[in-house]
Image (cartoon, grey):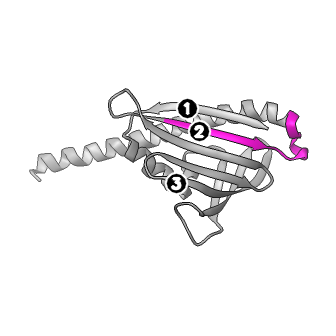
């Protein structure tokens, strides 16, 4: 089993980070390993939501089926992997000591199928996935910064117009 944990302090309020995380289809915009997401349940948010994520890591492509198992707005989202790769994953959010910042922690416990090397593949996969996910959190931060700067520009234009 591969136990992977990455964390990053993102200069955005917890509510803004949660809004990005809760928008499951948008994960493909900041996760380098997520190619496409298709819901397999009628539900799109909250516990019980199920979706397939086309995943690509180097030459390896697979469909990762996930079910949301935890949904605490502004605090945490957990999933269970029930496809070829099995295990659990969780995003947790907590306000950082830095003003208007949030610590985002991404934890996964994954079991790889025999054709991906099983336990030996997990040792290598752990390092590769941790590096990819650190990049994913950097892209999430950039996405949130971009949204924040667009909002600040809009507020500035409104002030200049006297709104």
Residue at the far left in the pictured view? 162
Return the x and y of residue 152 as percentages of the image width and height.
27, 43
| Residue ID for mark 3 | 71
- Give the image quarter of residue 33: top right
| Residue ID for mark 1 | 7
Q: Mark 3 and mark 1 in contact (Cβ < 8 Å)?
A: no
Q: Residue at x 86, y 43 (%)?
A: 116
Return the x and y of residue 119 as percentages of the image width and height.
86, 36
Q: CA distance from mark 2 to mark 3?
A: 14 Å
Question: Which label is found at residue 53?
Answer: none
| Residue ID for mark 2 | 106
Q: CA distance from mark 1 to mark 2?
A: 6 Å
Q: In this picture, is 48 found above or below 152?
A: below
Q: Earlier in the sequence, mark 1 or mark 2?
A: 1
Q: 10 Å neighbourhood of mark 1: few (<14), some, or many (≥20)?
A: some
What's the magenta region? 104-120
Quadrant containing the N terminus in the rendered view: top right
Q: Is residue 19 left or right of residue 139?
A: left
Q: Mark 3 and mark 2 in contact (Cβ < 8 Å)?
A: no
Q: 10 Å neighbourhood of mark 2: few (<14), some, or many (≥20)?
A: many
Q: Secondary structure at mark 3?
A: strand
Q: Mark 2 and mark 1 in contact (Cβ < 8 Å)?
A: yes
Considering depth in this image, is 33 or 110 the residue closer to the camera? 110
Q: Is residue 52 left or right of residue 150?
A: right
Considering depth in this image, is 81 or 117 the residue closer to the camera? 81
Return the x and y of residue 16 as percentages of the image width and height.
39, 46
Q: 10 Å neighbourhood of mark 3: few (<14), some, or many (≥20)?
A: some
Q: Residue at x 42, y 42 (%)?
A: 144
Q: Residue at x 66, y 68 (%)?
A: 40
Taking the magenta stretch, the answer to whether it contains residue 54 is no
């Amino acid at each position: 089993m591969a136990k992977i944990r990455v964390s990053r302090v993102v200069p955005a309020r917890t509510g803004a980070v949660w809004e990005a995380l809760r928008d499951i289809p948008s994960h493909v915009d900041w996760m380098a390993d997520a190619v496409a997401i298709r819901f397999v349940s009628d539900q799109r948010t909250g516990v019980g939501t199920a979706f397939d994520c086309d995943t690509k890591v180097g030459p390896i492509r697979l469909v990762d089926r996930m079910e949301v198992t935890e949904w605490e707005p502004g605090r945490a989202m957990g999933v269970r992997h029930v496809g070829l790769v099995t295990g659990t994953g969780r995003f947790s959010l907590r306000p950082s000591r830095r003003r208007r910042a949030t610590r985002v922690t991404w934890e996964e416990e994954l079991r790889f199928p025999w054709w991906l090397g099983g336990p030996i593949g997990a040792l290598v996969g752990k390092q590769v996935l941790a590096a990819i996910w650190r990049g994913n959190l950097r892209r999430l931060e950039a996405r949130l910064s971009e949204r924040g700067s667009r909002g600040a520009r809009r507020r500035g234009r409104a002030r200049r117009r006297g709104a």
